[in-house]
Image (cartoon, helix red, strand yellow):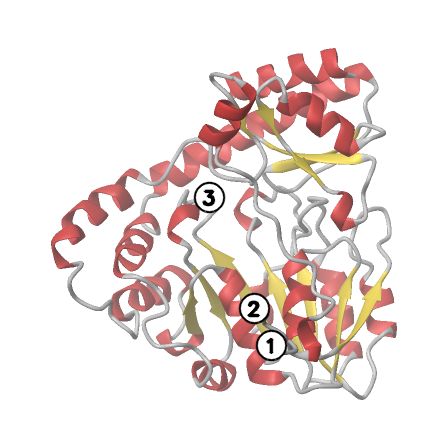
Amino acid sequence: MEFTSRTSDCIEDIIVYLPGKPVEELERELGLEKSIKLASNENPLGPSPLAVAAMKKGFSDLNRYPDGSGFYLKKALSHFHALNEECFILGNGTNEVLEIIAHAFLNPNDSVVFSEGAFIVYQIVSQLSCCKMKISPMKDFTHDLDGISKRVDDKTKIIFLANPNNPTGTSFSESDLVKLLEEISGNIVVVVDEAYCQFVTDENYPNTLELMNKYHNLVILRTFSKVYGLAGLRIGYGIAQPEIISILSKVREPFNVNSLALLAAENALGDEKHVKETISSNLEGREFLEKELTSLGIPFVSTQANFLMIDVSNGDRVYDSLLKRGVIVRPITGYGFPSHIRVSIGTMDENRRFMKDLKEVL
């Protein structure tokens, strides 16, 4: 019998996120070898060695449920950020923390505000909550916080901000963020997604942890996927005042973070050597790619993250051409940038190979 039940009205217009195929499968299909993946903004140096060692010790306890409170990781985060342990919530990646925030605060017909060209999950969690989405145009590939402020109304519950933004790599300043916070009601939750904050070199980048002391409606998101190299474990966290965390905790599923992720994150947090090497490698790669692209006259958006958005006139075509050469980048037509591709900054060998193939493709 054919299945005919109607779906929830909220999900009918959701665009399904389409992940890429495994590299091994692409190589098999296309007859390639030694492909490089520069599509998902991953850490090209791999995971923190301290995290790997900790996970190996934890294998024998996989018959047990994970610590549902994340006790030791929260203790480590408390020490690392000099904040009370009650200021943290853990998630299966920051994607889950975004879902938790939406479930905790949004009712149907509330409004949320975010920028065009922002991380696609903001739209997805808003649609799941049957909310009205008020989308503000970008200015120079950057969130226009004045434009966002003007779109706030008496039904606005949440503002989503990515800083730096994915996929553009741009960031906004502390003065612009403070101006926004002063203009809006303190009852509106302002989510600042800082997944790429460790790569930022802009001196005007906001110190959101300090701002949180004055603006109690701030929620800050951080991840272990990028600089710590733990993307495959799916672990991130939110930082906010305890009154907000207590609300979010009502929505969080029990045992939402697995035991190996908890162990890895706790130990990666203290791996200063790996973090410094990652940041240094990224900066070297960023400077190389920007210099090469400039010399060739290829437009790109100056980045504060570990990826570059490059104008290649036809992003989908260039993506396909590079793919056939074993260089996997990200087409971003779905974000509203059909002429661009997004390329993650890799090792120097990977960066050189990307530039060689890009020249030939163009």
User: In which quadrant is the N terminus drawn?
Assistant: bottom right
How many marks are shown on the rendered structure?
3
Where residue 102 is drawn, which disc sits there?
Answer: 1
Residue 313 % position (x, y): 85, 29
- Disc 1 to disc 3, how far (Cα)? 26 Å
**What residue appears at the point 81 percent right and 88 percent down from the top-left corner?**
154
Q: Quadrant of residue 108?
A: bottom right
Task: For marks 3 and 2, give the one nearer the viewer.
Answer: 2
Q: Nearer the viewer, residue 185 or 306?
A: 306
Res 227 label: 3
Write down the residue under mark 2: 98
Relative to 118, residue 10 above or below:
below
Q: For label 1, count other residues whose C-alpha is less than 10 Å away and answer few (under 14), some (14-19) or many (20+).
A: many
Q: Label 2 amino acid?
A: Leu
Q: Quadrant of residue 353?
A: top right
Residue in view at x 62 percent, y 54 percent: 17
Q: Position of residue 225 (x, y in %)?
A: 46, 49
Q: Quadrant of the C terminus?
A: top right
Left/right of residue 67 with respect to residue 22 in the rendered view: left
Q: For the residues marked 2 and 1, what is the alpha-carbon distance in whole angstroms?
A: 6 Å
Distance from the alpha carbon under mark 3 to that under mark 2: 20 Å
x 35%, y 42%: residue: 272
Which residue type does callout 3 highlight? Val
| Comes first in the chain, label 1 or label 3 | 1
Image height of 354 relative to 228, above or below: above
Q: Is residue 289 visible?
A: yes
| Badge 2: residue crowd in 10 Å (few <14, some 14–19, many ≥20) | many
